[in-house]
Image (cartoon, rainbow, N blue to C red):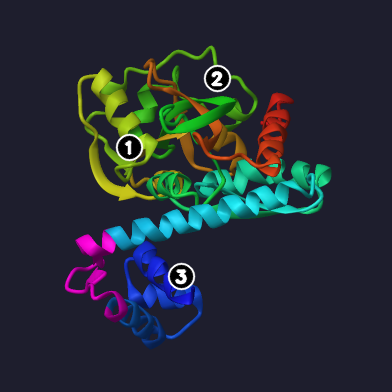
Amino acid sequence: MKEHEYIYTVYEEGSFSRAAKKLFVSQPAISIAVKKVEEELGIIIFDRASQPLKLTDEGKIYIKSIEEILSIEHTMKQHLSDISDLKSGHITVSGENFVSSFILPEIIMEFYHRYSGIKVELMESNSPILRNQLLSETIDLLVSHDKDSDLFESRELFCEEVLLSVSASNKINEKLSDFALSGDDIRQGKFYKRKTIDLSLFKDEPFLVLKPGNDLNQRAALICSDFGFEPKTGIFLDQLITAYNLCAYGMGATFVTDILVKKTAVQGCLYYRINSEHASRKMCIVSKKHRYLTKAAAAFIETACHVYKNGNM
């Protein structure tokens, strides 16, 4: 039903205007559809006085029911799709901006080479949204760091090391030449035996930190805590690549990964290794636990593991 789609999109976007833009319809059409359902059911779905929009108690029940309907429809389509025996089908794969730009393309290219009849839809957003989309079954697979094993099934693709990135123009680098690494050092794999830095030397530096909900937000706090300080955070960001670029312009230090440095061409930074158990994380391909996994999704997982097992870093 069209009204269900309209209402669920308003819920996802938190706004009538953004929902209209996403669906390519007018805002009045969205408002009329929502009002029609509210009048038919005798309830109010959205608290229109809040920004972004919030669900009423009745609205929460309505949205939960819609998600159950969508899940049933999706599972039916998946079962029917599997009858095609990988000759046709559709899967939705997602990741953060960096993952979508630099990790997933190699996997998708190999997958299309093997299964040319299956359509892959690629979505990207920040970590908290992607996690919720995986739980609500809006997406099939997520390429991300370690996830809650009670909720998700994960297959490891590779490990990455968290590094401190500092603008090369920062004067603090002058007395740390024995520890500093260039981008070329990391791309050539010359950094694994380099001495680690005493991170407390940077306690007075401003830090660029990802927003709460992102893995590197919590990881940054834990790493700094290992060295006895809290990072001075001036800017909170959605995407790691944005923090990295701002760091290159001298706006603050930030935490990056060796894979990010290897895959991008950002110039103007120096890097330091960190002696912390939190300075290492696994990149995985993740699915929702206890969800029916289609042949197409299983094939995509196996393709991803094959690509990175063969050292495509």
Q: Residue at x 24, y 42 (%)?
A: 233
Q: Residue at x 32, y 66 (%)?
A: 14
Vertical order, 209 against 280 (above or below): below
Q: Nearer the viewer, residue 294 or 80?
A: 80
Residue 299 picture location, percent across and down: 72, 37
Front: mark 1 or 2: 1
Q: Residue at x 53, y 50 (%)?
A: 139
The residue singled out by tag 2 in the image is 191
Badge 1 density bin: few <14, some 14–19, many ≥20, Cα 10 Å = some
When asked about the image quadrant of residue 224, the answer is top left
Q: Nearer the viewer, residue 303 or 109?
A: 303
Question: From which residue to which does the magenta span run?
Answer: 39-60
Report if residue 40 lies within the magenta region. yes
Front: mark 3 or 2: 3
Instruction: Tell whether label 3 touches label 1 (CB within 8 Å).
Output: no
Left or right placement of residue 227 versus residue 23 in this view: left
Kindly identify the amino acid type of the residue bearing the numbered disc 3: Glu
Mark 3 secondary-structure assignment: helix
Going from N to C along the chain, the mark reached first, 3 or 2, is: 3
Kindly identify the amino acid type of the residue bearing the numbered disc 2: Phe
**Spatial distance from mark 1 to mark 2, Cα to Cα?**
24 Å
Residue 253 picture location, percent across and down: 35, 37
User: Quick one: quadrant of the C terminus?
Assistant: top right
The residue singled out by tag 3 in the image is 5
On residue 217, which mark appears? 1
Can I make out residue 201 in this image? no
Left or right placement of residue 75 versus residue 69 in this view: right
**Spatial distance from mark 3 to mark 2, Cα to Cα?**
51 Å
Name, please, the residue furthest toward the left: 49
**Spatial distance from mark 1 to mark 3, Cα to Cα?**
33 Å
Kindly identify the amino acid type of the residue bearing the numbered disc 1: Asn
Mark 1 secondary-structure assignment: helix
